[in-house]
Image (cartoon, coloured by chain):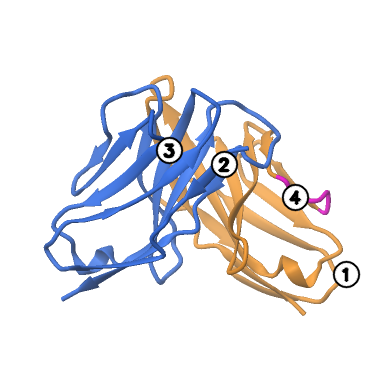
Amino acid sequence: AQTVTQSQPEMSVQEAETVTLSCTYDTSESDYYLFWYKQPPSRQMILVIRQEAYKQQNATENRFSVNFQKAAKSFSLKISDSQLGDAAMYFCAYRSAWDLNRDDKIIFGKGTRLHILP
Amino acid sequence: KAGVTQTPRYLIKTRGQQVTLSCSPISGHRSVSWYQQTPGQGLQFLFEYFSETQRNKGNFPGRFSGRQFSNSRSEMNVSTLELGDSALYLCASSLVQGAGSKETQYFGPGTRLLVL
């Protein structure tokens, strides 16, 4: 079964600085997708970034980028020029590329709460 | 463009009752997925629908069911409610383009269900 681990329950970063959130996963599949989601205090979940496992190039979305290491099964999120609006819970997620009626089709990590210090 | 809407936003039920939650996706999105979020279990995948067909289902008991209509609106139903079903239920609509190379996904605000 697939697992997703976020080892940092909480992190803080100074405004305008760069922060990296860690995520490791375990799978025996070769084809899958990885995601980072942001959930601010409003609880509105937002897709931050998506990575296809078969693509070696790291995904980027403006100030957000990932470091995808497939062999190491690592998928970290880097936030550059941190802003107060980045304060939120961040979830790493794995999604199998196959349509399956299994509970590990989509797996979320426990989340990392990110604080931005003014 | 209107976002993903979920109704109702808040719901209080008692054990043994049943509940139906609704999700209207973004226009043009044919994929709808449902998630349960609780403090103890975190985020868990419930099911995914695409063009009225259930494509994937998480490991939830048969009390949890769903469906999708021809207009892509989706409902999930929980029968014989238990205290542990108290949660925030999130719905997301997705559009995949370019043979899977680009995915747009938006979440609704959620339905907060409290079972007494």
Is A29 located above or below residue B37 in the figure?
A: above
Identify the subunit bearing mark 1.
B
Q: Nearer the viewer, residue A89 or B33?
A: A89
Q: Residue at x 51, y 44 (%)?
A: B93
Q: CA distance from mark 4 to mark 2?
A: 13 Å
Q: What residue did someone put label 3 on? A: A34
Instruction: Identify the amino acid type marked 3.
Output: Leu
Q: What residue did someone put label 2 on? A: A106
Can see residue B25?
A: no
Q: Residue at x 69, y 70 (%)?
A: B86
Q: Quadrant of the C terminus of chain A?
A: bottom left
Q: Residue at x 55, y 45 (%)?
A: A107
| Label 1 neighbour load within 10 Å: few <14, some 14-19, many 20+ | some
Q: Which residues are magenta?
A: B59-63
Task: Identify the mark nearer the N-term, 1 or 4.
Answer: 1
Could you say which quadrant of the image residue A116 lies in? bottom left
Per the rendering, the colour in which chain B appears is: orange
Q: Nearer the viewer, residue B73 or B94?
A: B94
Asked whether, in this view, residue B87 is left or right of residue A70, the answer is: right
Q: What residue did someone put label 4 on? A: B60
- Are the residues under marks 4 and 3 on the same chain? no
- Are the residues under marks 2 and 3 on the same chain? yes
Instruction: Identify the amino acid type marked 4.
Output: Phe
| Residue A41 image label | none
Q: What residue did someone put label 1 on? A: B16
Residue B61 is covered by the magenta coloring: yes
Instruction: Identify the amino acid type marked 1.
Output: Gly
Q: Quadrant of the N terminus of chain A?
A: top right
The secondary structure that dominates the magenta segment is loop
Which is in the foreground here, disc 1 or disc 3? Answer: 3
